[in-house]
Image (cartoon, rainbow, N blue to C red):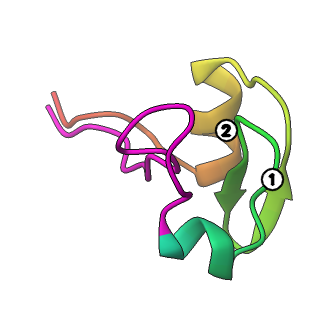
Amino acid sequence: MERLPYLECFPNGRNSPRAPACVEENITSYPTWIVNGQRYGQILAPERLAQLSNFTGPAP
């Protein structure tokens, strides 16, 4: 099963510098989801993420 790709903005802990990709994308609140170019700055249920990304699940 494939995992949802993600970027950890503080890979070295809470008080460490943000990851460069998070700075470049201006991510300042967590979680922030970027799906098909649209930003969502809140907690989203897995079902909602699947819907937004058109994920249909693994083939039977």
* Whole-number angstrom distance, CA of label 2 to CA of label 1: 24 Å
Q: In which quarter of the image is residue 14?
A: top right
Task: Answer with the quarter of the image where residue 46 lies.
Answer: top right
Is label 2 in a helix, a strand or a loop? helix
Residue 35 screen position, x and y as percent: 66, 60
Q: Residue at x 58, y 51 (%)?
A: 54
Query: Which amino acid type corresponds to the residue marked 2 in the rendered image?
Result: Gln
> Residue at label 1?
28
Reply yes or no: does residue 40 show up in magenta: no
The stretch in magenta equals: 1-19
Q: Position of residue 8 (x, y in %)?
A: 44, 46
Which quarter of the figure is the N terminus placed in?
top left
Residue type marked 1: Thr
Residue 18 placement (x, y as % from top left)? 56, 58
Instruction: Look at the numbered discs 2 and 1 and tell me whether their residues touch, using CB distance below 8 Å.
Output: no
**10 Å neighbourhood of mark 1: few (<14), some, or many (≥20)?**
few
| Residue 51, numbered circle | 2
Whether residue 8 is in magenta: the answer is yes
